[in-house]
Amino acid sequence: MSPSSPLWRPFTQHAVEPAPPKIVRAEGAWLETATGEKILDAISSWWVTTHGHRHPAIMAAIAEAGENLDQIIFAGLTHEPAERLARELVALAPAGLKHVFLSDSGSTAVEVALKMALGVFANRGETRTRIAVLEGGYHGDTIGTMSVGERGVFNAPYEPLLFEVERLPFPAPGREQATIDALDAAGRRGDLAAVVVEPLVLGAGGMRMYGPATLAELKRATERAGALFIADEVMTGWGRTGTLFACEQAGVAPDILCTSKGLTGGAVPLAATLATAEIFDAHYSTDRAKTFFHSSSFTANPIACAAALANIGVWRDEPVAERVAALASAQRARIGRFDGDARFANARVRGTIAAVDIVTPDAGYLAEIGPKLRAFFLGQGLLVRPLGDVVYLMPPYCVTEDELDRLYDAILEAPDALG
Ligand code: PLP
């Protein structure tokens, strides 16, 4: 039976999923439906609204930017919101990142990073084209980002479009050396162009976590391989793992860093790919064939840039780092509630992100329990979107301790409530 709405929704099986609630208002950690119900947004609307919905300073900046500017072609023209944003991002980012390429989604930020990396070696006349990735990663749903992401149900039909990459085993606790050894072995073949990782937390791949020491080792092994290190901080950036960027915890300076989601405080789409001078310089030439050939119509949208500047202003003017630390410690204080409970496994926290696996016969993204859990939480006025059997919380930094308690209570109730 076809649905009554012409909308074709993302990651939605229309044949089995109920019609979604219609949201008419959003504020802070809360959403309000057309029928007046309140929903606690425990996943920051797909991990974007770091400060909560409709932060006043960000909404005001968007309105103000629209008084003077709308979209301006960014090849051949420039504008102050983008110029300032680039300077501010370079000042905030890990050392060595000196150039900022603006785009409009996390996937695009990663596609841009892949093209930059291959462009470096092509422009230098070196034959390095292979990419290494961590097993279980997710970098987006475009062709390039699916190629570097985990293969599975998300992308099986598109397999003929995807390119092959070197897959490194996930550095699970006690298995880190196997990952580094695999990277060293790949490096010795001499054709590695780049290593792409989600630093510290693999998000859509199941909130799998590894430590800063391993991240630092991965960077060192990438250097030994003569390859470029691409940090996909699309999810981990803007405080999610406890620091502004996750790489900071490992003292890692990536060659390329991708950011989106929290870049505008989640209010409007924008992404940035930051690169070192070495990468920019490899494209800097009187030979026009060495140009970085990438663009999209909405590159550097001034209104989005103004929102990103306002987000940076919020980080500067409000105690955001303290809010992040408080949320991280509130998550750590509660995660022990799953200990010794046979219905749960692998309870884990990294910064503001908490996750736990529900013990079910069929683990993985298509676990039967996934949609049931989602419906159970929604029935309680909670927006929690498990990744199959993995339940996680990635709330906005304005969430209160009482709201967190409600979320943990609901997770603890869920397995029995579902029978
Ligand atoms: N990279 C990571 C680590 C992500 O978590 C995501 C989205 O969840 C993406 C890339 C893709 O971002 P977008 O959905 O904005 O294209």
Image (cartoon, rainbow, N blue to C red):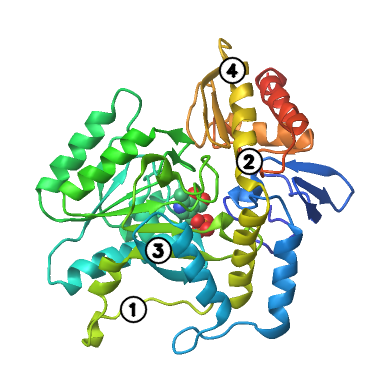
Is there any visible trace of residue 22 in the rendered image?
no
Is residue 169 shown above or below 4? above
Is residue 82 shown above or below 257? below
Distance (Cα) linking label 3 and label 2: 26 Å
Is there any visible trace of residue 64 in the rendered image?
yes
Label 2's element?
Answer: helix
Q: Amino acid at mark 4?
A: Gly
- Residue 251: x and y, percent? 36, 44
Of circles 2 and 4, the one toward us is: 2
> What number is the disc on residue 336?
4
Q: Amino acid at mark 3?
A: Leu
Count residues near mark 2 (Cα–Cα under 10 Å), then give few for <14, some for 14-19, many for 20+: few
Label 3's element?
Answer: strand
- Residue 96: x and y, percent? 34, 60
The residue drawn where x is 42% and y is 51% is 155
Disc 3 or 4, which lies upstream in sequence?
Answer: 3
Residue identifier under label 3 = 274
Distance (Cα) linking label 1 and label 3: 16 Å
Tell me where residue 395 sits by quadrant.
Answer: top right
Q: Are marks 3 and 4 in contact (CB under 8 Å)?
A: no
Q: Is residue 79 left or right of residue 141?
A: right
Residue identifier under label 1 = 293
